[in-house]
Image (cartoon, rainbow, N blue to C red):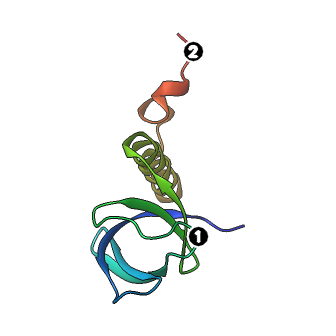
Amino acid sequence: MCLSVPMQVVEWEGEGDFAWVERAGRRERLNMMLVGPQPVGSWVLASLGLARELIDGEALARTEEALDALAASLAGDYDASLYFTDLSAE
């Protein structure tokens, strides 16, 4: 199983199919062939050095919340009432 993480396009490498992306102070070079050229500032889901899809602000927020929940769970600090509130039955 692979986990994709959101990364923001910050710079294009020449005229090719590679861009530099960042997230939380981490910078890496991504192959953008599956999503094509995207403007600086765009967010993509990255996995294994490849941008696999574009994401909008709503998808970015949901993904970040899921990653925060995972981190809290791994740290032993998970409180279900703090995460995935959009899934709560009212």
Q: Amino acid at mark 1?
A: Leu
Identity of the residue drawn at 45% across and 62% down: 44
Q: Position of residue 62 (x, y in %)?
A: 46, 42
- Crowding at dot 1, Cα within 10 Å, few <14 / some 14-19 / many 20+, comes out as few
Is any part of residue 76 visible from this angle? no
Q: Position of residue 33 (x, y in %)?
A: 55, 76
Is any part of residue 43 visible from this angle? yes
In this view, 50 is above or below 80:
below
Look at mark 1 in the image and give the residue it sits on: 34
Q: Amino acid at mark 2?
A: Ala
> What kind of element bears circle 1?
loop
Which quadrant holds residue 58? top left
Is 1 left, or right, of 31 in this rendering? right
Residue most extreme to the right: 1
Which quadrant holds residue 19? bottom left
Look at mark 2 in the image and give the residue it sits on: 89
